Image: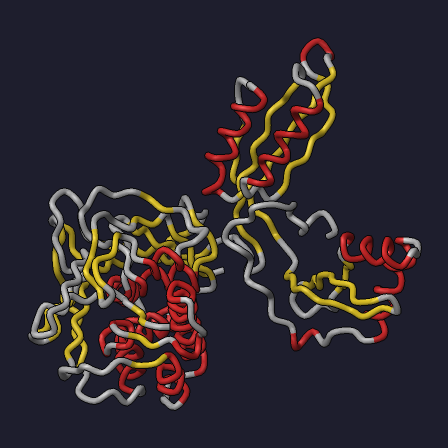
């Protein structure tokens, strides 16, 4: 499978991502012709070679006529749908814009249809987002992985006043994403960059096992002292399957604590986001009976899980390894029985026939309320699904949450306002000041990302 690993040492912005993807081999002709298909007047693109702290990288420059209009989310949707953009990059661009719109709708407390964009609706931001979608598809990337994301420090001035970094929309987009601290007084990750992470990210942490075929470097405008302002992307083949990921397995042997402590520790681990926690009876040194406690978690959650294990069990050591996990695709599904609706999950692989598994809690609730045996509810739910199965061709997997706060990994049990991509320092005649670490110089306009 072809994957991309983004090393966001000084954050991520749309222009840096597009520059890095083109530097890694994405067709510049495909990008420019796709942007032209949007029908935006007077737009031209240049890709310059620059140096940041002595290291070479590509830097995107977008030139366009002066503009003052804001665009509603619906206008962006119409722009994409009425363009000559190919289907796949158009779908990816829709995902990116919708991620930003949903974040803005939430932070401003208004319906999605009322959201309108400021800087994200500007021509250069549209070019960044659509260009990333085109380059991503042109390279045939099936999964994107990211390291922990630096957001920067300080504050920026936006349309609503002075906001701390990360700004509200960026923070909303990065919910559940591991963050890193880089001591730079700048907005290192813009809403556009955060949307790329949100919409395209498969996982976070160390670089997955892969054979690297190409490396691309995309630069922000600022040249920080001691910190090369460069985003690197590694493109290559991985043994991961499209329906698999990488998880961390933590294990420790325990023989000197009460069973209640193991139970309490398990609850804390699951509440912290562990995918699964289970215990296995083992014979330890001198044949003492003990328990091996095993925890599956996302790589970026391993540190918190380790801290819980040390605090609660007093174990002297934890074994830790990264392992590949293969999952069935899953989607929520409900059926209606004679006693009411039963929620459950569909599971399938590829074009295989989906299998329906009723949720225990849903069946137990009906069994209690209707005074019928639990097994009878289970069998009724399965019979209803068997009579009206779901067509596999209509199935689309639900995106997994970035962080689970409770519950086990059921893959092996049962199975608006205004969008501010502050990537632009409109320090010309608008009176806006957006200082963001990464920037464009667009033909006389100063857009500081």
Q: Indicate the colouring scheme.
A: secondary structure
The residue depicted at 41 percent of the width and 52 percent of the height is 211
Asked which quadrant contains residue 28, the reply is bottom left
Q: Is residue 275 left or right of residue 178?
A: right
Front residue of 253 and 372: 372
Give the number of marks: 0
Return the x and y of residue 212 as percentages of the image width and height: 37, 53
Q: Quadrant of the C terminus?
A: bottom left
Return the x and y of residue 288 as percentages of the image width and height: 72, 12
The residue depicted at 74 percent of the width and 51 percent of the height is 414
The residue depicted at 71 percent of the width and 67 percent of the height is 333
Asked which quadrant contains residue 29, the reply is bottom left
Relative vertical location of residue 83 with respect to residue 214 in this rendering, above or below: below
Return the x and y of residue 6 as percentages of the image width and height: 35, 54
Return the x and y of residue 91 as percentages of the image width and height: 45, 77
Relative vertical location of residue 227 with respect to residue 18 in this rendering, above or below: above
Question: Residue extending furthest top?
Answer: 286
Asked which quadrant contains residue 99, the reply is bottom left
Relative vertical location of residue 147 with respect to residue 45 in this rendering, above or below: above
Relative vertical location of residue 185 with respect to residue 22 in this rendering, above or below: above
Front residue of 417 and 219: 417
Q: Is residue 65 left or right of residue 149?
A: left
Q: Is residue 62 left or right of residue 273?
A: left
């Amino acid at each position: 499978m072809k994957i991309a690993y983004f090393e966001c040492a000084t954050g991520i912005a749309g222009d840096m991502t597009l520059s890095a993807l083109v530097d890694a081999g994405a067709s510049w002709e495909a990008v420019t012709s796709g942007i032209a298909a949007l029908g935006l007047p007077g737009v031209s693109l240049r890709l310059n070679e620059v140096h940041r702290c002595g290291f070479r990288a590509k830097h995107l420059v977008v030139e366009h006529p002066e503009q003052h209009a804001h665009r509603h989310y619906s206008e962006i949707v119409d722009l994409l749908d009425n363009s000559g953009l190919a289907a796949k990059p158009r779908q990816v661009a829709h995902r990116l814009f919708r991620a930003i719109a949903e974040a803005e709708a939430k932070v401003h407390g208004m319906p999605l249809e009322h959201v309108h964009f400021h800087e994200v609706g500007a021509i250069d931001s549209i070019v960044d987002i659509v260009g990333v979608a085109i380059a991503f598809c042109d390279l045939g990337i099936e999964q994107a992985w990211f390291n922990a994301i630096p957001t920067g420090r300080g504050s920026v001035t936006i349309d609503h006043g002075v906001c701390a970094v990360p700004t509200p929309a960026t923070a909303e987009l990065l919910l559940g994403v591991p963050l890193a601290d880089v001591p730079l007084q700048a907005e290192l990750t813009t809403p556009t960059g955060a949307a790329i992470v949100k919409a395209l990210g498969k996982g976070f942490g160390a670089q997955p096992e892969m054979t690297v075929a190409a490396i691309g470097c995309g630069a922000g405008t600022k040249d920080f002292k001691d910190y090369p302002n460069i985003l690197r992307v590694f493109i290559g083949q991985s043994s991961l399957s499209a329906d698999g990921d990488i998880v961390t397995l933590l294990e420790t042997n325990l023989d000197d604590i009460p069973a209640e402590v193991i139970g309490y520790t398990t609850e804390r681990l699951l509440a912290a986001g562990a995918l699964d926690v289970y215990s296995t009876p083992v014979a330890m040194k001198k044949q003492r009976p003990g328990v091996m406690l095993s925890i599956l978690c996302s790589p970026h959650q391993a540190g918190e899980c380790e801290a819980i294990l040390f605090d609660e069990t007093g174990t002297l050591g934890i074994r830790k390894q990264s392992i590949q996990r293969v999952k069935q695709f899953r989607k929520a599904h409900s059926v209606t029985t004679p006693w009411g609706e039963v929620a459950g999950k569909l599971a399938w692989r590829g074009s295989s026939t989906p299998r329906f598994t009723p949720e225990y809690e849903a069946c137990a609730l009906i069994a209690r309320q209707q005074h019928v045996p639990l097994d009878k509810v289970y069998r009724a739910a399965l019979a209803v699904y068997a009579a009206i199965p779901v067509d596999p061709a209509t199935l689309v997997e639900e995106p997994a949450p970035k962080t689970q706060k409770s519950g086990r990994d059921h893959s092996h049990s049962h199975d608006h306002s205004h969008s501010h991509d502050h990537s632009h320092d409109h320090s010309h005649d608008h009176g806006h000041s957006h200082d963001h670490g990464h920037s464009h110089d667009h033909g006389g306009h100063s857009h500081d990302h």
